[in-house]
Image (cartoon, grey):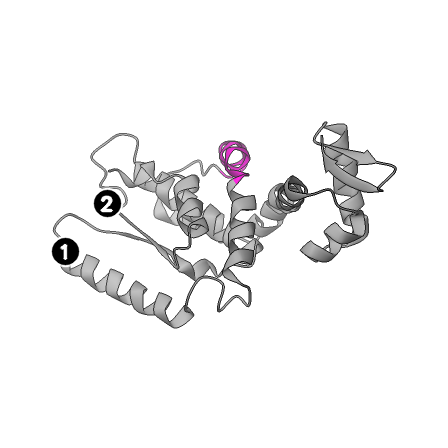
Amino acid sequence: MCSGRVDLEFILRAFAKGQDGVYIGGCKLDECNYVTHGNYDALANTYIAKKMLKRIGINPDRLRIDFMTGADGNLLAEYTDEFAQEIKALGPLGQSEGMSLEQARFKLEAARNLVPFMRLAERERFRVPEKSKQAYTEFFKGPDIDRLFDQVFDDKIAISQIMLLLKNQPMTTSDIADDLGLNPSDVSRHMITSSRHGMVRYDTDSKCYMLA
């Protein structure tokens, strides 16, 4: 399978199902057999997934991508052994991050719900114009990418987590803030936005928000 087929959904779903690490192996950059050069898509998805993981508190080192030829079996063995040792040192998912597996899965599920939005963001905001390793490195490790990513991702992940909480039961603003470690004023702002979009409604009797 072409590494370009490795979607953000595949990566996040693997973690959400409890995998401690995800390794992606692709053909060498600039040596793709197809005009699509899908390995660059895999590289972009890896960079984006790492930034998503970091922002939900999951160590981005749990995800790795390497590029090699079909004749590089020795490199594959070396890289995967090295990665396995790194993951072993980190421990089970959530352990080195200071959260339970249940908490990690909750955050990952919220991130998975944003995959369609992040695909669109990748096309409109994170698309690198030139397919070269240098261009991708400079773009995704440049000084402006984190600021841009914060603008695109932070509010969306907060709302996604709130929606997951409300899926279980109605909650007050303060309860949501306490559960997610958010500022109550930020929760109120997210609820106003979500209410305008018809996603939630406010019950005046219980003073709780619930899914619309």
Q: Which of 92 and 86 is in front in this view?
A: 92
Region rendered in magenta:
113-126
On screen, residue 92 above or below 169 = below
Q: Residue at x 28, y 66 (%)?
A: 82
Q: Within 10 Å of the Cα at label 1, are there few (<14), some (14-19), or many (20+) other Cα atoms?
A: few
Q: Residue at x 48, y 46 (%)?
A: 48
Reading the image, the residue beneath label 1 is 73
Q: Which residue is drawn at 23% across and 45% down?
A: 27
Give the mark nearer the N terminus: 1 vs 2. Answer: 2
Q: Picture coordinates of residue 98 (x, y %)?
A: 55, 68
Reading the image, the residue beneath label 2 is 27
Q: Assess whether residue 119 is covered by the magenta stretch.
A: yes
Q: Which of 210 and 41 is in front in this view?
A: 210
Q: Name the residue type under label 2.
A: Cys
Classify residue 55 as left or right of residue 130: right
Q: Picture coordinates of residue 50 (x, y %)?
A: 47, 52
Q: Main secondary structure of the magenta part?
A: helix
